[in-house]
Every structure is written in C-alpha cells, then in structure tokens.
Amino acid sequence: MTAVAENRVVRRNGPGTKRADWNCWPPLAFEEMDSALNIQQYIQQTIKANPSDVETILTPPLDQDEGVWKYEHLRQFCIELNGLALLLQRECVPETCQQMTATEQWIFLCAAHKNPNECPAIDYTRHTLDGAATLLNSNKYFPSRVNIKEISISKLGSVARRVYRIFSHAFFHHRKLFDEFENETHLCKRFTTYVSKYNLMQQEHLIVPILPNQQQQQTAQ
C-alpha cells in the first residue's frame, strides 16, 4: 500500500456508523472540493465547525455565484428544519394546534391544497417542507445546481416566507421546544440573517425577535 493510499480520507459514512462518528472527518479547503455539490459540502462543513458562527456560515467563497449560494442555503435550511418538525410532534397535535398560527394576529393558509386552506399546524409544517423540497428539487426550475436562472432564483422568496412560519409558530406556541432546538442549531438566527441579507422577506414579517436589533425594537415598544 502506498503512502498516498494510507493518507487518503474517505468522506463517507459507512454502514453501522455511530452517531458520534457521523461525518467525522477532517475539514477540506473549498478549492479541494471537486464535486458538483461542493457548495452544499462547504456549507455543511462550515455549520458543523461552529453552528453559532452565523456570519462565517453565510459568507460565500471568493467569486461564488450568488444565486447558487442562496439556493444551496435555502435547501440546507429545509433539511435542518425537519429536526424542528420532529421536535414539534411531541406536543403540536391537531387537537391543540388546529390552525397554523403565530400569536393571535397571524393565521396562515396552507398552499398544499387545491385552494389555500387552513389545516392543523403540524400538517402545515409537513406540507410546507414537502412542498419546498419538491420545488427546490424540481428539474423544471432547478435543473442544475451549478448555474441557476434568475427566473428560478425568484422562487426562493416564496419558499422562505412559508418555511419561516414554522419558526414563528414554534416560537410563540411551543417556546420550550423552540429554545431547545435553537440553542443547539442557531437555525432561526441564521435564517433571519440570511433572508435579511438577501432581501427575501420584508422586515415586518420577521416576527421572531431573534436578532439583537429586533430584540431592541421589541424592548422599546
């Protein structure tokens, strides 16, 4: 066996890999990521290094296409949001959360039906994540993950608005579960920073006070 073969790192989780050893390999420089999925690989690697370092996670490599960068981040948000959906199943049930709400002022209609309609919050969550996955993996709108057309990038704002409602429902109606998830992942903080940075949502719709400036505004009111 050659020295090169001995030093080669296999970046793959084998059958029977323990949770503690999952994705447990040394980091790789972005320039060395020779794959069509290098942006996803880079984002996931940066998150793993320090999920609380939102600024670093959202800073693209030099000369990175902005459309691809925004797209890959939104895909990653939807992947991670499944973890929050799983937690919500502990107590977010149709009997107690009959509508997708965030405070008494916001009731959201589910776009998964033939006509937008009310449905229980946990069903809304599942439908929204399923719909986002379908759109973001659509060959019609996103046939390539290397070069994305502007008309397809325009779809990202709609996805962002819908998935954000999962955060807002969890924050206002399942605060303990929200805090448990957020303290570990910092996902809502990262998502809010992301949509603000790229103007994917209007500020008045970002109702979870997760960023310092939002908390200051809430205190002042």
Image (tube, helix red, strand yellow):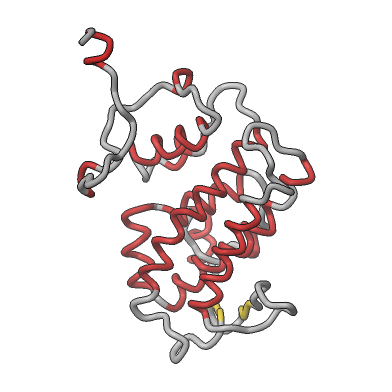
Residue in view at x 44 percent, y 18 percent: 32
Residue in view at x 55 percent, y 79 percent: 101
x and y, in percent, of residue 216 in the image: 49, 59
Most extreme residue toward the right is 151
In the depicted view, which residue is nearer to us: 76 or 54?
Answer: 76
Most extreme residue toward the top is 2
Tell me if residue 165 comes above or below residue 185 in the rendering.
below
Q: Quadrant of the C terminus?
A: bottom right
In the depicted view, which residue is nearer to us: 9 or 48?
Answer: 9
Most extreme residue toward the bottom is 95
Tell me if residue 14 comes above or below residue 118 in the rendering.
above
Q: Would residue 9 appear left or right of 66 to someone viewing this image?
A: left
Asked which quadrant contains residue 163, the reply is bottom right
Q: Would residue 15 appear left or right of 219 to someone viewing this image?
A: left
Tell me if residue 150 comes above or below residue 214 in the rendering.
above
x and y, in percent, of residue 167 in the image: 49, 65
Residue in view at x 51 percent, y 55 percent: 78
In the depicted view, which residue is nearer to us: 31 or 56?
Answer: 31
In the depicted view, which residue is nearer to us: 8 or 66?
Answer: 8
Residue in view at x 33 percent, y 35 percent: 12
x and y, in percent, of residue 22 in the image: 27, 43
Most extreme residue toward the front is 1
x and y, in percent, of residue 137 in the image: 61, 50
- Number of numbered discs visible in the structure rendering: 0
Q: Quadrant of the N terminus?
A: top left
Q: Would residue 14 appear left or right of 185 to someone viewing this image?
A: left
